[in-house]
Image (spheres, grey):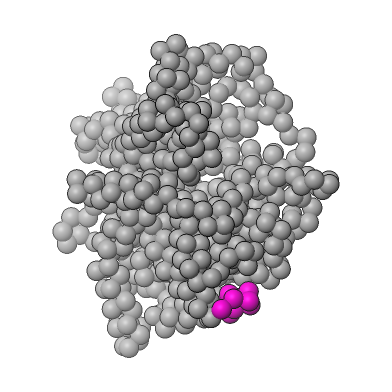
Amino acid sequence: MSDAPETKSLPENAYLPLEPGQVYQPIIPASMDVPQASWRAVLWGLLFCVIFTVASAYSGLKVGQVMEAAIPISILAIGLARMYSRRSTLLENVIITGVGGVSGSIVAGAIFTLPALYILQLNPHPVQTIFICLAGGVMGTLFLIPLRRYFVREMHGQFPYPEATAITEVLVTGEKGGSQARLLLQATFLAGIYDFFVTTFQVWKEYVDFRFIGVVEAVATRAKVVFNFDAIAFILGLGYVMGLRSSMVLCAGGVLSNFVLVPMIWFVGRHLPDLVVYPATASIAGMTATQIFRGYVRFVGVGAIATAGIFGIVKSLKIVAGSFGIALKAFRAGDQAAGERTDQDISLMAMLVGVVLTAVGVGVFFGYLHTSLSVVLVGLLLTLVFSFFFTSVAANAIATVARNPVSGMTMLTIIISSVVLLRFGLSGTTGMFFVMAMAGMVCTALSASGQFITDLKTGYWLGSTPRVQERVKFLGVIVASVAAALTIVMLAKAFQFGEALPGDPRTVLPSPQASIMKALVQGFMSQQPVAYILFGAGAMIAVVTEMLGIPSLTFALGMYLPLELNTPALVGGFLAHYIGKRSEKVGGHAGATIRERGVIIASGLMAGGALGGVFGAALRLFPWYKEELVRTPFFGIDWLSQTVSALLFVALCAYIWYGSLRRQREGAAA
């Protein structure tokens, strides 16, 4: 095979809805055959997968922070491409990024659930931990394939795909070189340094709430109306790529949760200081705004997300049915009916065999837990249904806001599964193990599918063959599952998960997410009530947003996510809107350059922020690390520290604005 041709820029309609009859043409056209899943690409991808899996598992259990792998790996892939006499192709770099990026998704599913089994002293066998990760990863990958055509091809330009955009811009811009590559590296370096120091050390406050102002503090204390803002580069870039519409809907959900529901609950409960209302464990009168959000409002958000997911599945049914029709036609007629290279999936038979084998394996796994046949069958059915359902939710969430509601959907799995299986006589330690194993599979499935939709969209923009991406993805799932499970097994021998036990001298790894899941399954297996009213309220909110024509899942995610993650994204959305308006006003090549430079800078902020997060998480693995290793004299002065943070965030905004318009000004000066 010959080397790939010189890389071109992304087409102008890469991020825009297509006109009637218009077809998107990727950088590498369907008629061109260039190396993709070469040995070098697959082996480098698997190596990065193992490294990031082990590091992410430890950092996730220690500080609850999973390393963002895909964007840093895309940067590494650009560097590796220059090491060989035959420079790696753009599509080989897609494979390296996709295979390596599996690490973060499998680890996210594993650390949310598996440590809970050790906290409950159920001590799973290493083979069991591997199988839970593997089954979930395989289901998430298999169930997403029929949805690929809907989310990636048919809805082109309808979803912003923030993470996929960042990866694509890194790969294309890094490949092209020149002034745009310098701009990308500049933004990446700036954001990497900025986010690394602000999130790792005590230089200035990461979160801005302006509570040092008397009026703001009074409102926060008396009405539980608390404003929060995470002033980092990564979320600013994320909001820019999302655009104004998506970021505004996302932030609107956060406004409803934090400025309406939290104060309302406080208003009702503050007069009953001795009353504890389930599911919270303390009286509302004594709770902070954050505690009210976590104890009540978050469950409303979970109900909204689940209902919005149902709407999403209904909307995609026609395309999914069409995908099965195309696959069946190709299966009957052979490759001649399979369509062009950039729209080919693995065969329908391979998908069906994969689903059947995975289902049989899960059934056998449940059977070895010494439960009745009815429990095994019900558990298998719930696992398959939840995994398929949440695959759509995860794909929609990642395509819109690059945030996967893993914890909320896992909590919902535990709650519903516990309620159902209790009716079939499952309880006690066996019930806890059974439900947590189910939750582990479902959690890993939705996490893996969310990451995979990013890979498929990146490949679509650049011209990859989906079938090739799907095949190598399974290799990444296998390797990441073994690495993540064995890492957790080894850590369980050296550390305690959750809280310290009397007489156990081992160091504690907090495992924050798994500790929440453990408390949840323990409570439901003890037959505690279910907060149906909160889930139902969230469901009705999702129905209302659909009636109003608002993207219900984006709004629901805004309700569920902490407000500090929504507000800076809105700032990025406004920047994207006004820079877009300026590019339209200028028009022509100069206007297109403004728009392109804005996306490159925003992608660089995301890439640099992700790298800064990786380095910060890596430092936390060392026993000598302390946040106060780097501490400015003013860090403890709240008003000054927050003011510095706010001003520097404004400087980042100015960097995007003036960096995008620089070519226009240079042209005017000339």
Query: What's the residue at 31%, 88% (across, down)?
Result: 333
In the depicted structure, whether residue 102 falls above or below residue 289: below
**For residue 259, which quarter of the picture?**
top left
Q: Name the spot of residue 408 as percent of width and height, x first.
A: 46, 50
Is residue 364 magenta-colored? yes
- Magenta segment range? 363-372
Image quarter of the C terminus: top left
Which one is in front, 157 or 427? 427
Q: Name the spot of residue 592 as percent of width and height, x first.
A: 28, 40
Give the mark count: 0
Query: What's the residue at 30%, 73% (across, down)?
Result: 323
Q: Is residue 12 visible?
A: no
Which one is in front, 221 or 207? 221
Q: Name the spot of residue 231 as percent of width and height, x first.
A: 48, 28
**For residue 664, which quarter of the picture?**
top left
Q: Is residue 587 left or right of residue 377?
A: left
Query: What's the residue at 43%, 80% (across, down)?
Result: 352
Q: Which residue, as the protein is rendered here, is positioned at the far bottom?
A: 332
Q: Which residue, as the protein is rendered here, is positioned at the far left?
A: 20
Q: Is residue 282 left or right of residue 542?
A: right
In the depicted structure, whether residue 482 falls above or below residue 294: below
Q: Is residue 669 visible?
A: yes
